[in-house]
């Protein structure tokens, strides 16, 4: 094992999970959390105290000084592009949070930069790592559903996500970019097909009322190139009293069978503290915490597995493997195809037309 040297760029709400992942891989010498970069200096200081890494406010300086084997990019969606290209040019393997970029052109540039540099470009589409979704894929591949005719997806966040997590950039994102993208990729991966045409409608009421702006909800119907149609309902206006931060699920119906997976309530844990709603339900498959024999916190679930997969891919490369040896992982083209669906969803919202992808 090579013990990859790792850095993280963007240490906000989701960046903490990348920090947790790399710190705990360090417990077993599997990887080393070397450096973290965050432009918000007080947040950088807070994270550095908790996780102990070389702190930077300038990612170019970090890439230049730290001889990293891999970086993860966890900045807001529209800021992934330049950072990924810079990491590639520095010869560093990259895991980029979803969406890869908010334009297809940007995705292509990122893919080309990584290809030119010969580095790994992986996208954190972690729904592929959910054991239930993996089982769905096996059953579909085995032909249990026959020809899949149609499907339905819902993914809805509590309003605290755009209101409290990132009110500053919620308007430059949307339920399609922040939530839909997960399931656009998952549907592609399950169906082994690409998006072909989209028709979408949406509403802008609640977030406008709250002074945040942008889309409350987006309903998109996507026709895939194998003939399957999937309807995706996405929103981030669920009330604060909803018992989980996210409500989500997928169902697919084929000529020989159907599959339904509700990933909202997978084992209820009663939580009631402070102002939090009582009896919250948690998707424990995504992230759960335990303590190891040394009393250190260890995070598990598919939210960790997908980041760990990047580390094991980097390790394989350091051990002499090539990109072709890595097998299946969500790559730059997967990022591009999911972004193409999301941009078509937005074009349809703006024009009212069916958009060909
Ligand atoms: N995979 C998932 O389930 C999941 C969940 C949440 C967010 N995300 C994705 O992760 C990314 C970050 O989301 P978030 O919720 O953590 O947002 P956030 O706003 O909480 O955090 C982003 C951080 O990046 C920092 N930043 C911005 N520009 C920077 C730069 N040039 N250098 C260093 N730091 C910089 C910001 O200061 C901020 O702290 C987004 O792309 C989002 O879509 C993924």
Image (spheres, grey):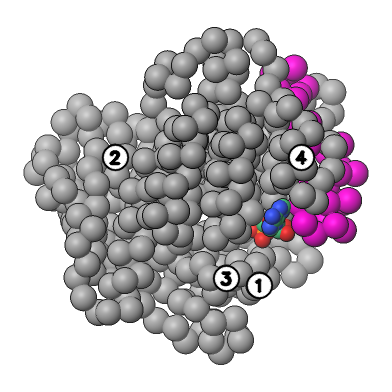
Residue carrying label 2:
190
What's the distance in space between the residues labelled 1 and 2, CA to CA? 34 Å
Task: Give the quadrant of the C terminus.
Answer: bottom left
Residue at the spot x=70%, y=17% of the render? Answer: 3
Query: CB under 8 Å between callouts 3 and 2?
Result: no
Residue 51 magenta-highlighted: yes
Mark 3 — residue?
170
Local SS, label 1? loop
> Which residue corresponds to the image point at 60% horizontal and 15% vertical from the top-left?
318
Residue ID at (76%, 40%): 62
Rendered view: 114 above or below 328: below
Q: Are marks 4 and 2 in contact (CB under 8 Å)?
A: no
The residue that disc 1 covers is 168
The disc, 4 or 1, on the residue closer to the chain's N-terminal end is 4
Q: Is residue 158 left or right of residue 20?
A: left
Residue 174, position in %: x, y?
Answer: 48, 68
Return the x and y of residue 10 as percentages of the image width and height: 69, 50
**Above/below status of 137 relative to 185:** above
Quarter where residue 354 is shown: bottom left
Real-space Cα separation, disc 3 to disc 4, in angstroms: 28 Å
Instruction: Quote the CA–CA distance across marks 4 and 1.
Output: 25 Å
- Of labels 3 and 4, earlier in sequence is 4
Left of 248 or right of it: where is 272? right
Asked if residue 251 is positioned above or below residue 332 in the image, the reply reads below
CB-based contact (under 8 Å), mark 3 and mark 1: yes
Q: Magenta part of the protein: which range? A: 26-52
For label 2, being within 8 Å of ligand 1 is answered: no
């Amino acid at each position: 094992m090579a013990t990859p040297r790792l850095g993280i760029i963007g240490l906000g709400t989701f960046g903490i999970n990348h920090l947790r992942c790399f710190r705990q891989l360090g417990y077993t010498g599997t990887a080393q959390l070397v450096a973290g970069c965050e432009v918000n200096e007080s947040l950088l200081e807070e994270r550095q105290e908790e996780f102990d890494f070389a702190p930077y406010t300038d990612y170019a300086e970090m890439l230049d000084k730290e001889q990293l084997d891999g970086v993860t990019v966890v900045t807001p969606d529209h800021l992934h592009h330049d950072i990924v290209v810079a990491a590639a040019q520095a010869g560093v393997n990259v895991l980029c949070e979803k969406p890869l970029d908010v334009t297809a052109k940007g995705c292509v540039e990122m893919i080309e930069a990584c290809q030119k540099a010969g580095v790994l470009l992986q996208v954190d589409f972690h729904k592929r790592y959910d054991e239930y979704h993996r089982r769905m894929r096996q059953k579909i591949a085995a032909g249990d559903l026959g020809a899949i005719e149609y499907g339905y997806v819902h993914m809805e966040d509590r309003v605290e996500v755009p209101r409290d997590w990132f009110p500053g950039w919620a308007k430059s994102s949307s339920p399609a970019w922040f939530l839909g993208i997960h399931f656009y990729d998952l549907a592609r991966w399950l169906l082994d097909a690409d998006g072909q045409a989209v028709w979408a409608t949406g509403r802008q009421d609640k977030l406008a009322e709250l002074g945040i702006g942008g889309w409350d909800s987006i309903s998109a119907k996507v026709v895939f190139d194998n003939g399957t149609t999937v309807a995706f309902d996405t929103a981030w206006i669920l009330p604060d009293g909803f018992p989980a931060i996210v409500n989500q699920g997928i169902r697919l119906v084929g000529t020989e069978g159907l599959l339904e997976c509700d990933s909202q309530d997978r084992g209820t844990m009663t939580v009631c503290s402070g102002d939090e709603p009582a009896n919250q339900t948690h998707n424990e498959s995504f992230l759960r915490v335990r303590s190891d024999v040394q009393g250190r916190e260890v995070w598990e679930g598919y939210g960790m597995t997908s980041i760990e997969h990047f580390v094991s891919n980097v390790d394989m490369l350091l051990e002499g493997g090539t990109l072709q040896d890595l097998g299946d992982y969500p790559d730059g083209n997967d990022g591009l195809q999911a972004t193409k669906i999301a941009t078509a969803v937005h074009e349809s919202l703006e024009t009212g037309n069916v958009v060909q992808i």
